Image: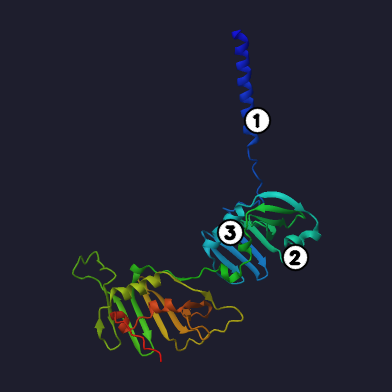
Amino acid sequence: MKRPITMLSIILVIQIIIMLLVSTDTNKVTKKEAFLKSDTSRVDYIKIQNEHGELVMKRFGMTWKITEPIEWKANSSYIKTLLEKMAELKLESAITSNEDKYVLYELDGAVAKYIEIGEEGGVIDKFYCGKPSENYKHTYVRQADSDEVWMVSGSPRSSFTREPSMWRDKGILALDKTMIEQIKLKFPNEVITLNRVIDTGGDSDSGFVMPDTSWMATKRNGESFEPVEKATNRILNTLNRLNAMKFMDAPTDTIPDFSNPEFTIEVYLEGDQKEVLDFIPKADEETRYVARHNGEESTVFVIYQSTVKNLKKDEDALKGIEKKEEPEF
């Protein structure tokens, strides 16, 4: 009697094992094929054509630069996001190879975004990006050398619709505060020079530098005073990270006259480096200024009024004297 029971037990165990194996095999997720052939970690060339024109960006070492329609450093954050999104594109399902239906997926010539991606001087992928799916988790795409429309995972379309100017790195200055030796604040009727003070009472060999509060201000007439820490810190922090809102170099932009700027700041750093910024109010926007960097007409940009205020410190501001606003009648 025990023998049949033992056999039944063995058979039952075998059946359970088989069921588990079948179940495990059924739950396996088939690895989806990548839409692009490129290894995005090695990509060094990107070209995008959309309704705003053509944009070409190339990688030089670790730095990405725009080469067309302008030459400028590219926004590294945007590049990183774009490459990550493209790496995630996986084939989901084939939709159609009928050219008459391209318009349904915004893959016709009128509205499709055209993209090229290259490595080491050669173009690896050429494709068109159409509209996203209804849930915005997928996108309709087509390789340039194929008639087949595919739905792929991911939604990179927003990166392909930007104007070329939006890909520009908007950083103007990123000065190391500890390297700044002198700052000149130039107003129409006054020039105030801020000099970093060296503690001559310390170890002269080490050249010990006092904290950021160790600045001395000198007016044009020779009168000197010690500025408040809050004011000098505002200036230094702004110079450490100065960004433009936008640039004024489009064909439709009119470059303003900088012959008599409202305010100029000159920054002198160790190693004979000099940076100059000129500011004038933007005529058509009260809360904006137009600025020029190092006298270059090619580096004219728009900046917030509040940012200029952080730099534009007159004698009262440097002394910590708050100006009372006159009441309006």
**Which residue occupies the extreme top position in the image?**
1
Please tell me which of labels 3 and 2 falls first in the chain.
3
Q: What residue does disc 3 label?
A: 82
**Closer to the camera, 16 or 115?**
16
The residue at 47%/88% (across/down) is: 259
Q: CA distance from mark 1 to mark 3?
A: 40 Å
Q: Is residue 147 left or right of residue 232?
A: right
Alpha carbon distance from label 1 to label 2: 48 Å
- Write down the residue under mark 2: 109
In 3D space, how far apart are the residues under numbered discs 3 and 2 (Cα atoms)? 23 Å
Q: Are marks 1 and 3 in contact (CB under 8 Å)?
A: no
Q: Nearer the viewer, residue 4 or 67?
A: 4
The residue that appears at 64% across and 42% down in the rendered structure is 31
Examine the image and state in which quarter residue 190 appears.
bottom left
Nearest-to-viewer mark from 1 and 2: 1
In the image, which is nearer the foreground, mark 1 or mark 3?
Answer: 1
Q: Position of residue 36 (x, y in %)?
A: 66, 52
Indicate which disc, 1 or 2, sits on the residue closer to the N terminus: 1
Residue type of the residue flagged with mark 1 = Val
Say what amino acid the circle numbered 2 marks: Gly
Q: Which residue is mark 1?
A: 22
- What amino acid is labelled 3 in the image? Leu
